[in-house]
């Protein structure tokens, strides 16, 4: 395991204590982990992962600017990861379900396509 990220409970406590948290009606969390098989079905024993910090900051800013979104957090694990290790943790908080689901999907998609570089090891 490359690293241990912040807990969702810590993030929830932080966000609930911030100004504007009374407008939050939903929190959504994503915890991506290394699977034992690639999308095509080939076996995977681990992954080497790096990420671009500037693109992470840009993706978080975009998420925080989305309609109805009050807070967004993301942590990305970097280094050699084994099957079952966390790849990323993402949390989005906002007003209503439609806005929060859309923002979480956009943020995770942006992180996976623009921010992280994964090399699966078979």
Image (tube, rainbow, N blue to C red):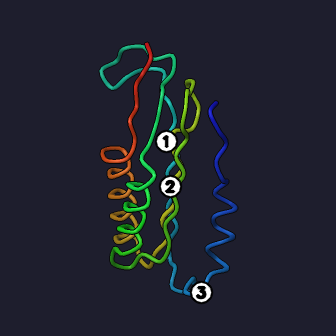
Please name the residue shown 30% across and 21% down the image. 40
Does residue 18 sit above or below 41 in this rendering?
below
Q: Position of residue 94 (x, y in %)?
A: 46, 75
Please name the residue shown 49% across and 51% down the image. 30
Name the quarter where the C terminus is drawn.
Answer: top left
Q: Which mark is residue 32?
A: 1
Q: Determine which residue is flagged by label 2.
A: 90
Most foreground residue, 55 or 90: 55
> Rounded to the nearest whole Å, what is the CA distance between mark 2 and mark 3?
20 Å
Kindly report which numbered mark, 3 or 1, lies closer to the viewer in this rendering. Answer: 3
Q: Determine which residue is flagged by label 3.
A: 19
Sequence-first disc among 1 and 2: 1
Give neighbour class at mark 3: few <14, some 14-19, many 20+ (Cα, 10 Å).
few
> Rounded to the nearest whole Å, what is the CA distance between mark 1 and mark 2?
9 Å
> Rounded to the nearest whole Å, what is the CA distance between mark 3 and mark 1?
29 Å
Q: Position of residue 58 (x, y in %)?
A: 37, 62
Sequence-first disc among 3 and 1: 3
Horizontal relation, residue 2 to residue 122: left or right = right
Does residue 3 sit above or below 43 in this rendering?
below
For mark 3, give the secondary structure: loop
Name the quarter where the N terminus is drawn.
Answer: top right
**Image-quadrant location for residue 99:** bottom left
Most foreground residue, 44 or 47: 47
Most foreground residue, 75 or 103: 75
Give neighbour class at mark 2: few <14, some 14-19, many 20+ (Cα, 10 Å).
many
């Amino acid at each position: 395991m490359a690293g241990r990220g912040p807990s969702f409970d810590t993030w929830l406590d932080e966000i609930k204590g911030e100004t504007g948290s009374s407008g939050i009606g939903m929190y959504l969390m994503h915890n991506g982990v290394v699977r034992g098989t690639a999308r095509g079905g080939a076996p995977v024993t681990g992954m080497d992962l790096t990420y671009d910090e500037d693109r992470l900051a840009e993706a978080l800013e975009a998420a925080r600017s989305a309609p109805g979104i009050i807070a967004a957090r993301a942590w990305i694990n970097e280094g050699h990861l084994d099957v079952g290790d966390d790849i990323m943790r993402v949390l989005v908080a906002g007003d209503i379900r439609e806005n929060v689901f859309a923002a979480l999907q956009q943020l995770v998609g942006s992180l996976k396509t623009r921010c992280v570089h994964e090399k699966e090891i078979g």
